[in-house]
Amino acid sequence: MPLQDLVEYFNDRLGREHRSSFRPFILEHGKVSGLFGPIQIDSFLAPLRKTLAPTVIVGHTAQISVAANNTRHLHANEIETLLANNSVPTTDSESIINFDRLSRTVHMLNYLTLSHLQGLLFLDVDPRHILGIKQDHGAYFEEVIAKCGLKTKNVVIVLAVNSQYARYYQELINGLDNYRHRGYQIALKFDCLAQESQVVDLITKISPNYVSLSAQNMEDQAHEDNLLAKLHQLKTSVASVGGQSILHEIYEKKFDLLARNAGLDLVEGGYYRAIPFNYLSNSKPEIKI
């Protein structure tokens, strides 16, 4: 189905769900944006590369870009709808779920221009979304994926691990299991190298397909003598459950070297976009899983 037709389809679908004529998805210059109240949501799809062969792209991580919505206005019938539904205010949980679904649909629609490459699409899911949905996690988005002509096996659900949600880990694990049963792959994202025992415990319980860390959050640890050993231990733990390790947000050569020396599987970041491909390899970029 042409991209414009898909945009119209999802606008119609959200209109029916929320009993509104407002159409949040916009297609301009070949890119899809989403409107959510006062903000406009856009996508940036960052290539995910093999560490030892960075010209080989295995997929893309969807990163959200937010700007002010300067086109926002309400038609008369929308105002009437809002007034009619004023007695049923949207809860914080519902707002988070709606925002998450809207942004992931934007990412999916923008990914369609790359989907012929058969790579993976990594999508962040807010922990509050997982906690707010009591069952059938991934069912709503599975319909979006199917309508786009894709399969859940090519979508990786990324959960950011945060100590704020430590008391809810079992509920989050149950939600991730629901995603996995629908064919999605699972990734855990750590902001930093947390206490090793906690990390290993989560990896063992969840058996994620991928585990990622941010190089930007390691700046203060870059000169620690045991950093390389910690990363290698993480890679070993992930590999023990059949997963792959990722270092994100690499903007300097020292973190590229760190990923290589630690044996991490995949890398992502502006460092690889800033240097010529013939510096990385004599081969042309290709897609492989």
Image (cartoon, rainbow, N blue to C red):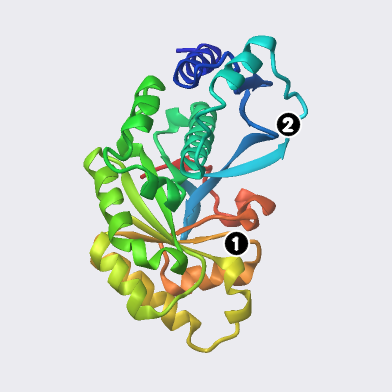
C-alpha span from label 1 to label 2: 30 Å
Q: Quadrant of the C terminus?
A: top left
Q: Say which mark, if any, is on residue 69.
A: 2
Q: Indicate left or right for 192 with 155 as reference.
A: right
**Residue 72 image offset from top left, x and y in percent:** 72, 24
151 or 195, which is in the foreground?
A: 195
Q: Position of residue 192 (x, y in %)?
A: 51, 71
Q: Is residue 70 above or below residue 252?
A: above
Of the pair 261 and 48, the residue shown nearer to us: 48
Q: Classify mark 1: helix, strand or loop.
A: loop
Q: Which amino acid does label 1 sit on?
A: Ile
In what quadrant of the picture does the N terminus appear? top left
Which callout, 1 or 2, points to the residue nearer the camera?
2
Q: As displayed, is residue 198 above or below residue 131?
A: below
Label 2 CA crowd tier, 10 Å (few <14, some 14–19, many 20+): some
> Which is more N-terminal, label 2 or label 1?
2
- Image side of residue 271 versus residue 137, left or right: right
Q: Which of 236 and 164 is in front in this view?
A: 164
Q: Is residue 167 above or below residue 146?
A: below
Question: At 36% across and 66% down in the image, what residue appears?
Answer: 167
- Furthest residue in direction front, as rendered: 87
Q: Look at 73% across and 20% down and name the residue there.
A: 73
